Image (cartoon, rainbow, N blue to C red):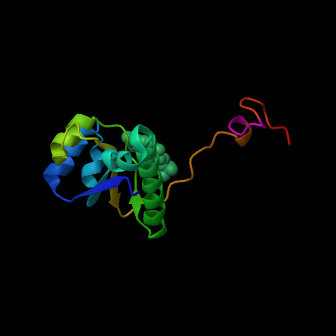
Amino acid sequence: MQSWDIILIKSRERKEALVKAALNQTFIAEAPFVLVVCANMPRTAKIYGDRGANLYALQDTAAYIQTLLLLLSARGLGACWIGAFRDDLVAEALEIPMNQGIRPVAIIPIGKPAEQPRPPKRIPLNRILYDEIYGKEKRD
Ligand SMILES: Cc1cc2nc3c(=O)[nH]c(=O)nc-3n(C[C@H](O)[C@H](O)[C@H](O)COP(=O)(O)O)c2cc1C
């Protein structure tokens, strides 16, 4: 389906507008490139109706974002999935039409990584993997 639309931002003014939209996450403006990935709900709804609009479009777009992040990392680039932002301010900055089902899902600043961070801590597997039924701890 390719339920997503992507906007490439290089201009300083728009990056600054995205910083404001993203609750003042100033590092966005330091990146040479910023992508904003939106779920295009009507495109998915055309075939799959309400479930397409409200679930598949977001699932599909999230899967795309994850794949994109892996690709960028494999090419030696640094990126960050930013989900904390005001939809209305992102829409205003990028002239995304309101109320037409184009929903910004992630702001992704991209640049040369300044450091190689250690992998973050993970929740132990036995607290998120259950045995046959939800909540039943896996013992072996
Ligand atoms: C859905 C989602 C939303 C996120 N939103 C933000 C955000 O607004 N700002 C931020 O700094 N990190 C955000 N993160 C976290 C970063 O993208 C990244 O995963 C985190 O900094 C850990 O990075 P690391 O795995 O390279 O250590 C978000 C992650 C996800 C999955």
**In the image, is 72 to the left or to the right of 88?**
right
Please tell me in which quadrant of the rendered image residue 18 appears: top left
Instruction: Identify which residue is drawn at 27% across, 34% down.
Output: 86
Residue 46 spot, x, y in % from top left = 35, 48
Q: Is residue 130 magenta?
A: yes
Main SS, magenta residues? loop
Q: As displayed, is residue 41 above or below residue 75?
A: above
> Which residue is farthest bottom?
75
> Which residue is farthest right?
140
Nearer the observer, 68 or 74: 68
Quarter in which the N terminus is drawn: bottom left
Whether residue 108 is visible here, answered yes or no, is: yes
Instruction: Identify which residue is drawn at 16% across, 44% down.
Output: 93
Nearer the observer, 73 or 97: 97
Q: How many numbered discs, if any?
A: 0
Residue 54 spot, x, y in % from top left = 41, 38
Q: Is residue 59 magenta?
A: no
In which of the image's four quarters is ligand 1 placed?
A: top left
Instruction: Identify which residue is drawn at 42% across, 64% down.
Output: 72
The residue segment tinted magenta is 127-132
Nearer the observer, 8 or 10: 8
Q: As displayed, is residue 42 above or below residue 64?
A: above
Residue 68 spot, x, y in % from top left = 43, 60
**In the image, is 72 to the left or to the right of 139?**
left
Instruction: Identify which residue is drawn at 44% across, 58% down.
Output: 69
Q: As displayed, is residue 50 above or below residue 117?
A: above
Residue 33 spot, x, y in % from top left = 27, 60
Whether residue 20 is visible here, answered yes or no, is: no
